Image: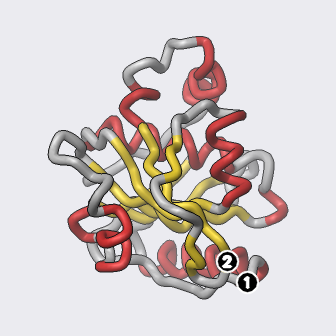
Amino acid sequence: MYKQVETVQELAKFHEIKETVWTSMGFEMEYAKEGSAQFLLLADDGEAGGTFEMTPFSKSSAYMKSLFQDVVTEDMKVMEVDSLAVLPKYRGQLGQKGICLMIDYAEKHGYTHAIGVADPTFFKFINTKYQVKATQTKDIVFYKGADAIPTLFHLKDVYDNKHDPKYSWYNSSSSNQVKVEVGG
């Protein structure tokens, strides 16, 4: 499950989880962007154990816009994905929920693609385990304290083909997952 951040307390929990994870990985902390939608990823025990943030590309930072300006085309509707952070206790159960959230959010809001700077392990993982096409768009960059891969995620390909057997992980997760409404 996931829940969109709506209160000051939920935003504080979002930042607490993200800071715990990012600090442990040596990343420089970055707070929620204005105009973005923040989400708490909820574990089976009901506790918030992860975070994810979606931002319309038009509201991305100047750095992110410059990194992807030659990749984004007029026929794409693009969002930036950021802040996927999962507490160690919940690793193995919330990553997939975060990927499902990214796809659900994109479909609900008509986003065809997402951009972001991906951890190299996550980049490999999303391409191989989940078969979500993620394209490296530039050489690895040093970002917020670690190497990251500038990535274009092809999300419309997934939500338009949800019933393809290669996305059985999405179908089984979605059918068993009670989602909190993804707002505005």
The residue under the point 57% across, 61% down is 149
| Residue 52: image location, x then y, percent | 52, 61
Q: Quadrant of the C terminus?
A: bottom left
Left or right for 25, reference 111: right
In this picture, is 83 found above or below 93?
Answer: below
Is the Cβ of the residue at disc 1 closer than 8 Å to that at disc 2? yes
Question: Measured along the vertical axis of the image, is residue 115 above or below residue 34?
Answer: above
Image point (45%, 39%), residue name? 103
Of badges 1 and 2, the one in the foreground is 2
Percent position (x, y) of residue 30?
51, 83
Mark 1 neighbour class, 10 Å CA radius: few under 14, some 14 to 19, many 20 or more = few
- Residue 48: tell me if it is visible: no
At 70% from the left and 51% from the top, the residue drawn is 43
Q: Disc 2 marks which residue?
A: 146
Residue 17: x and y in percent read 65, 74
Determine the secondary structure under disc 1.
loop
Looking at the rendered structure, the number of numbered marks drawn on it comes to 2
Q: Which residue is mark 1?
A: 26
